[in-house]
Image (cartoon, rainbow, N blue to C red):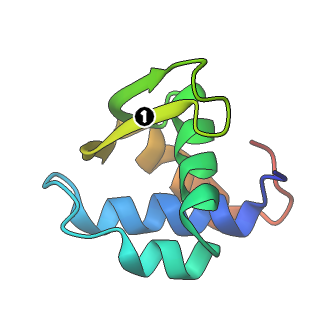
């Protein structure tokens, strides 16, 4: 999966709209990103960079769905909010 600036910005903006409360439903973001696989990809990417918090568990079995994410634990953190502000100020994408 290719990570795009628009998807990063959409995901962080969506999470910021709920901050500091938990997300009620990810359905609007799933539709915007194109599906649940894309949503998981962006969440894992943002978690790897330290921009969001949540419970992420990687299991090797089954290989088609290695990530278990507790969706009601997902929230943007201060680093994510600051990164979103920088994204909105700049044109080129730098993760």
Residue 91: x %, y % from top left: 82, 66
Quadrant containing the C terminus is top right
Q: Nearer the viewer, residue 46 or 68?
A: 68
Q: SS of the residue at dot 1?
A: strand
Vertical relation: 35 (above or below) 56: below
Vertical relation: 61 (above or below) 9: above
Residue named by callout 1:
68
Outermost residue, left side: 21
- x 31%, y 44%: residue: 74
Image quadrant assignment for residue 4: bottom right
Vertical relation: 61 (above or below) 21: above
Residue 73: x %, y % from top left: 23, 40
Residue 25: x %, y % from top left: 26, 70
Q: Nearer the viewer, residue 36 or 16?
A: 36
Q: Residues within 10 Å of mark 1 (few under 14, many from 20)?
A: few
Picture mark count? 1
- x 42%, y 34%: residue: 68
9 lies left or right of 76: right
């Amino acid at each position: 999966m290719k990570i795009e600036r628009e998807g990063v910005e959409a995901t962080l903006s969506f999470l910021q709209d709920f901050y500091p409360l938990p997300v009620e439903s990810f359905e609007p973001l799933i539709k915007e990103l194109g599906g649940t696989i894309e949503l998981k990809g962006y969440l894992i990417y943002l978690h790897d960079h330290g921009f969001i918090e949540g419970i992420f568990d990687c299991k090797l079995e089954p290989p088609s769905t290695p990530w278990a994410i507790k969706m009601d634990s997902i929230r943007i953190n201060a680093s994510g909010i600051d990164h979103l502000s920088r994204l909105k100020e700049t044109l080129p994408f730098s993760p």
